[in-house]
Amino acid sequence: QVQLVESGGGLVQAGGSLRLSCAASGRTFSNYAVGWFRQTPGKEREFVGDISLSGESTYVVDSAKGRFTVSRDNAKNTVYLQMNSLEPEDTAVYYCAAATARRVGASRRGYDYWGQGTQVTVSS
């Protein structure tokens, strides 16, 4: 079993940047594909992007292309979500999730482990 802890959220003005971290403990993180999701009140948790267990393959949704980047440092057991040019619409609780697979993608059911989330608030 792996435990995930997100950090790096906060309050930022529109156009600003944040880097979220997803730190893993309990198992070798290089054996896990990781996804990032976000959720706002009253809405379903939505997929933001993911990264394969090796880090060779990454993906972010169209609304984040050119602004968000997913990366990982397996030596540090950490996956990152770099968010630039933030918009008020990016305000949400951001979650990372992991699964023992080469890559999972957008399906929430494909992930076995979830962090507790970190709040990102973008002011206009």
Image: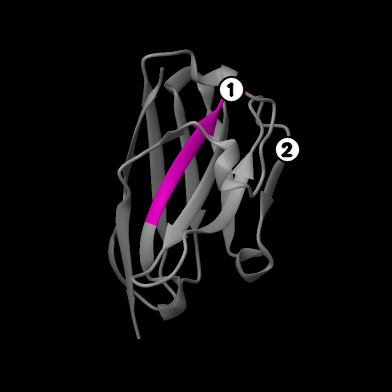
Amino acid type of the residue tagged 2 in the rendering: Ser
Give the numbered dot on residue 100.
Answer: 1
Task: Compute the Cα span from label 2 to label 1.
Answer: 15 Å
Residue nearest the viewer, comparing 77 with 113:
113
Number of numbered markers: 2
Specify the quadrant that holds the N terminus.
top left
Q: Is residue 58 above or below residue 4?
A: below
Image coords of residue 9 (percent x, y): 31, 55
Q: Residue at x 65, y 25 (%)?
A: 101
Amino acid type of the residue tagged 1 in the rendering: Thr
Query: Which of the 4 quarters of the picture holds residue 58?
Result: top right
| Element marked by disc 1 | loop
Callout 2: few (<14), some (14-19), or many (20+) C-alpha neighbours within 10 Å? Answer: few
Q: Are marks 2 and 1 in contact (CB under 8 Å)?
A: no
In the image as oriented, which residue stretches furthest toward the bottom? 124
Question: Which residue lies under the disc numbered 2?
Answer: 57
User: In the rendered structure, does residue 96 fall within the stretch colored magenta?
Assistant: yes
Residue nearest the viewer, comparing 64 with 45:
45
In the image as oriented, which residue stretches furthest toward the left? 11
Q: Main secondary structure of the magenta part?
A: strand
The colour scheme used to paint the residues is: one colour
Residue segment shown in magenta: 94-100
Q: Residue at x 35, y 86 (%)?
A: 124
User: In the rendered structure, does residue 112 fall within the stretch colored magenta?
Assistant: no
